[in-house]
Amino acid sequence: MKEKRTYSLTAKERKQRRAEAEKKQNKQIKSGGDAQSAEAAMLASQKTAKRNAVTVGAVLCVAIILVIAALLAPVIAYVVNPYAGYKDVIARFKLSNGMTLEYVIDEKQYDIAATNFIFLAKSGYFDNTVFYDASNGWLRFGGYEGVPNASAGLSSNYELTKHHSDNKDFCTKFTAIPNKPFEKNISDKFGYRFRADSGGTNNSLLNQAGILTYLYSDTSTEFQMSWKEQPTNEMRKAEGGYDVLEPTMVGHVLNEKTLENVIEIANTAVVNEKITSGYKWATPSPTIYIRKVSVYNLKGSKWRNFDFIEYADGKDKDNRNRLSQWIGRA
């Protein structure tokens, strides 16, 4: 039997085999590269999709916020200023019995009286004071911190009665009027007396129900609301006779509900006939406190940096001095 021989590859065959091996290797490399490229492309696509989703989400969030803001804007505006739809200055009284009183303050027509009222209200002067008298068609308020009602059994309206001007601590802390010119007697900071505005003392105006007036001749801080037509400007004295009051216009009720509330309060008033000194006030019973007076729709530069003394020392639209006097001012 013949022995089988094994022949070596020729140079040509070896070359051919190497070429085939290289071709196979290149094909594998290419296949791997294509897989990597596909994976990279997929990752890039996922990142793009994620960015797009975030962008769309952000746009939707902004859109939702804008819609909510648009819906809430009127509500927020009302909370900040419930009288934004009115051109006039509006004063809102919040009372201890839950009532609300709303008045139009005629600053254009009655600048001095209206400015005095607005200044005192903005400075918190009326907060936690009482309605102390409802006689002769007027409901009066100002600086009284408390008054005895008819059941107190006192002989004087000045027992248990406290006014801001007699409260040294209140006067000192009321820095809307500086303390320095009144170091000798701090209560004199409320000793100013204004003149009446032109036209503010017209009887045809003062005889109406539903008006707000300022007792300018004898006081700086006392005001009154009319609750019936033809109110009389008198204060009954316990010793007999009357003191005649001089009011000037400030404004009028915003709505009928306010007048109804004022009438309801006035109808609770009782005179303490046992009082033998001071005034025979008809005091609402039970005592009703003014918790807060807020003022809305103030316009122009006047109120941005308002200086009360500078204003008081100035002249009115008729070029008259606004002040008639300031008792005790240095």
Image: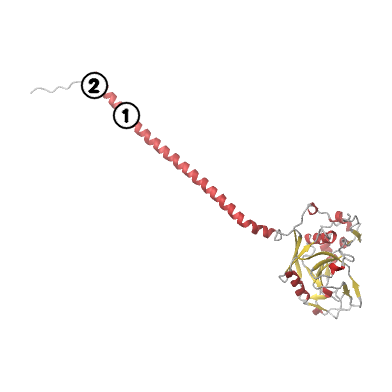
Query: In x, y percent, where is residue 247?
Result: 86, 67
Query: In x, y percent, where is residue 258?
Result: 74, 69
Q: What residue did someone put label 1 on?
A: 25
Give residue 129's quadrant in the image.
bottom right
- At x 67%, y 57%, the residue is 77
Residue at the extreme top: 11
Q: Quadrant of the N terminus?
A: top left
Q: Indicate the amino acid at tag 1.
A: Gln
* Left or right: where 28 falls relative to 139: left
Q: What residue did someone put label 2 on?
A: 13
Whether residue 173 appears in this view of the structure is no
- At x 61%, y 57%, the residue is 71
Query: In x, y percent, where is residue 154?
Result: 84, 78
Whether residue 32 appears in this view of the structure is yes
Tell me how many marks there are: 2
Q: How far apart, in angstroms, are the residues tagged by discs 1 and 2?
A: 18 Å
- At x 78%, y 74%, the residue is 266
Q: Earlier in the sequence, mark 1 or mark 2?
A: 2
What label sits on residue 200 in the rendered view?
A: none
Q: Indicate the amino acid at tag 2.
A: Glu
User: Label 1's element?
Assistant: helix
